[in-house]
């Protein structure tokens, strides 16, 4: 009797497990004959820290992007990836072998890094093709108007109130940034007011380009990894237009690029055949 009960329980557990596995691998959405599984959506949520709805939109955009790459014949081969890695290494004053060693010390898998470089190149080449006929150079009047409307972005504060997050381990610091209220072992915090005339230009640029209430990117500093949470800019003063004309142009171009890319994919999405088989 006990043996039969055990057999029945095992069969029930096995059937449930198989059913669950089938559900996880099941197709959720089809985008122009390209399937998106429930598992892919789940992994995207976990990897990018996105809520389910945004993870779904991200996956749909990825499928549309893959279609555009194929339609336009855009490819990236091993030579392209290695060449890009050499360029990245040279910019940092090292060679590709030293870069690989550095990545290993930071716990970054080399094959995964190469995959990221390939994805970056594919996206850059796709965007370049999309934008090649969409943006016309701005006039002087256009740039001056953009400067006037975004004067806060071209101002230097006398001081910046920040909270400095530091850690010897990059992953620990990234976890603290993801959960600022949590106590992450190895991560220290220090509130401070930084005077603009007492820090180097690179740090000043990093801080002033970060919106209030946001973290800067993580940067290595003397054997530690550091990020700053920007709290407030004190007494900002506009920089004369002629001194920041190039920055105004770059910001205007970046904004137009984002608008053009968003518009392009919005049209692709509207024209795509998207079928939801199972709600994620």
Image: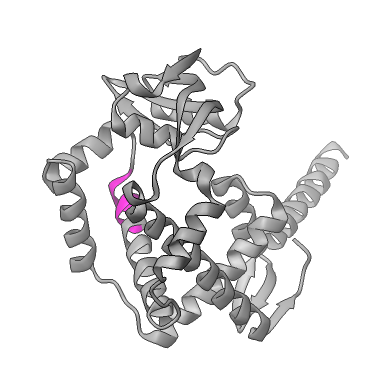
Give the vertical position of 165 relative to 204 (above or below). Answer: above
Q: Is residue 29 left or right of residue 140?
A: right
Tell me if I can see residue 190 in this picture: no
Q: Depth check: 91 or 13 in front?
A: 91
Q: Depth check: 16 or 204 in front?
A: 204
Give the vertical position of 112 relative to 127 (above or below). Answer: above
Q: Position of residue 153 (x, y in %)?
A: 49, 44
Q: Position of residue 152 (x, y in %)?
A: 53, 42
For image coordinates 44% across by 87% down, the residue present is 71
Q: Quadrant of the N terminus?
A: top right
The reply to whether the magenta stretch includes residue 114 is yes
For image coordinates 44% across by 62% down, the residue present is 143
Give the vertical position of 247 relative to 221 (above or below). Answer: below
Q: Depth check: 188 or 117 in front?
A: 188
Q: Residue furthest right?
A: 1
- The residue segment tinted magenta is 109-115
The reply to whether the magenta stretch includes residue 222 is no
Q: Magenta span: helix, strand or loop, mainly?
A: helix
Tell me if I can see residue 114 in this picture: yes
For image coordinates 27% across by 31% down, the residue present is 105
Q: Is residue 42 left or right of residue 176?
A: right
Q: Depth check: 41 or 244 in front?
A: 244
Rendering colour mode = one colour
Q: Position of residue 185 (x, y in %)?
A: 50, 15
Number of numbered discs present? 0
Q: Is residue 68 left or right of residue 4?
A: left
């Amino acid at each position: 009797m006990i043996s039969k009960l055990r057999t029945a329980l095992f069969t029930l557990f096995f059937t449930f497990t198989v059913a669950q596995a089938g559900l996880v691998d099941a197709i959720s959405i089809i985008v122009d004959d390209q399937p998106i599984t429930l598992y892919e959506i789940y992994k995207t949520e976990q990897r990018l820290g996105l809520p389910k709805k945004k993870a779904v939109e991200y996956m749909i955009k990825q499928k549309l992007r893959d279609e555009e790459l194929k339609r336009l014949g855009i490819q990236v081969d091993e030579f392209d990836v290695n060449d890009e890695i050499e360029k990245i290494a040279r910019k940092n004053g090292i060679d590709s072998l030293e870069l690989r060693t550095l990545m290993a010390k930071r716990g970054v898998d080399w094959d995964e890094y190469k995959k990221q470089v390939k994805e970056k190149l594919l996206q850059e080449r796709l965007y370049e093709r999309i934008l090649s006929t969409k943006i016309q150079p701005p006039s002087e009047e256009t740039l001056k108007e953009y400067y006037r409307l975004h004067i806060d972005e071209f101002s230097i504060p006398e001081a910046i109130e920040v909270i400095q997050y530091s850690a010897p381990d990059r992953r620990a610091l990234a976890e603290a940034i993801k959960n600022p209220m949590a106590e992450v072992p190895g991560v220290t915090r220090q509130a401070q007011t930084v005077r603009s005339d007492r820090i180097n230009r690179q740090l000043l640029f990093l801080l002033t380009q970060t919106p209030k209430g946001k973290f800067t990117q993580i940067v290595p500093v003397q054997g530690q990894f550091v990020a700053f949470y920007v709290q407030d800019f004190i007494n900002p003063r506009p920089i004369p237009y002629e001194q920041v004309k190039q920055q105004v142009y770059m910001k205007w171009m970046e904004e137009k690029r984002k608008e053009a890319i968003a518009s392009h994919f919005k049209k692709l999405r509207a024209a795509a055949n998207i079928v939801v088989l199972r709600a994620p």
